[in-house]
Amino acid sequence: MKTTIEKLAGDTEGVSYELTVFRFKGASKNSPTAYIQAALHAGELPGVVAVHALMPKLRAAEAEGRILGDIMIVPAANPVGRAQYHFGELEGRFHMGTRNNFNRDFPLLARPDKSALPSLPAASTTDRRLKHLLVGLSMGHDIVLDLHCDFEGVPYLYVPKQLWPAMQDCAAAMGVDAVVLWDGPSGAAFEEASIYPWLQVSPDKARLEQRVVTTVELRGLSDVYDRYAKADAEGIYRLLATRGVIADEKAAKPRKYTGVVATIDHVDMIAMPRAGAILFHVEPGQRVRKGARLATIVHSPGEENGSVDVLAPQSGYVFTRVSKRSGRAGDDIVKMIGDARSAHAKSGALED
Ligand SMILES: [Zn+2]
């Protein structure tokens, strides 16, 4: 394994960032290659600890000559966001200098080749330089995993519609509970930047059935535990074995995916009708009937009729909820996968 440090200039004098990259060389040129990054949203650490638990397994595979395809790992993809403490709170989702989401506005290349990456204008800000760097590192790999997490949630995947059902084996290997299929523009999220160039070339070159591109949501922000890290590392390792990046017959044994699958237009984003305190009645992973109470919002404490119930707009499956317990009118607090299309269906990206 080779370790390199990528340097990233900051936006002011005397400021720079460093990014660690691990590279395992595959023994076979014909085997699929993999790129795995974690914490692009810098405060989302379940993926970081999963990668930490994965590394010893990869080192062992390397020592035994079982790594077939090249593997590149970026265990903490966003040192810029990681340093953004504002009054004691980490702001890892948006770049504070530009207000841009770190997982939007990636360059969309015309072909799946680093040479298609345009050179950066000199006036680019650090967040743009970071996105340019990450696309350059990941481009051309057959398997691209972007490890994120939700506020509170089940483990689930976003998958480009074009890669399903071919990616069922991956969902099964990783042991996720739900898969959300999307297509169309998603604000140029990293996942879109990873699949877009392959959709611009002919099907025989793209070989979409061999490709894995996914945003992996590893439960919630606070689900940073040794047991989850180990389980998620096992899941990623199984995926690599299943797709032939690593030779391990036992881990590669095919599994059947039995979780929830839906297109993104089935996702209902449930918003608060009033500002106030949130009393949840449901947890991620629960099925609900139409009209079921998802939460009660206490908007006028102490008063008669001082609270209002938030009801399920249709029957379905609750897969995330926010971790805060207070909010403003209009704040989204629950994501559920409805049995039918949502009355407020979205296509590419659910959140800003
Ligand atoms: Zn994220």
Image: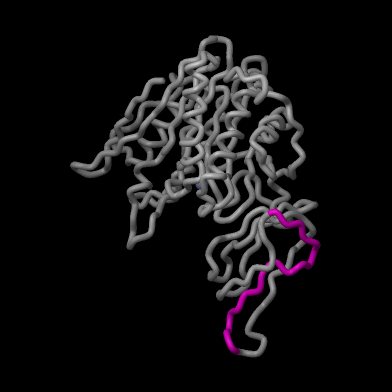
The residue range painted magenta reads 285-302
Tell me: residue 47, above or below residue 320: above
Q: Residue at x 74, y 64 (%)?
A: 312
Q: Position of residue 124 (x, y in %)?
A: 32, 38
Q: Nearer the viewer, residue 121 or 283?
A: 283
Asked whether the viewer can see residue 188, the reply is: no
Tell me: residue 150, above or below residue 129: below
Q: Nearer the viewer, residue 348 or 262?
A: 262
Q: Position of residue 105 (x, y in %)?
A: 47, 40
User: Which quadrant of the structure image shows residue 278?
Assistant: bottom right
Tell me: residue 207, above or below residue 314: above
User: Which quadrant of the structure image shows residue 322?
Assistant: bottom right
Q: Residue at x 55, y 55 (%)?
A: 151
**Left or right: where 240 falls relative to 70:** right
Q: Residue at x 44, y 44 (%)?
A: 102
Residue 148 magenta: no
Q: Position of residue 233 (x, y in %)?
A: 55, 35
Q: Position of residue 34 (x, y in %)?
A: 53, 24
Q: Nearer the viewer, residue 53 or 336?
A: 53
**Left or right: where 349 falls relative to 136:** right
Q: Residue at x 58, y 44 (%)?
A: 217
In the rendered view, how is the structure colored? one colour
**Left or right: where 161 falls relative to 116:** right
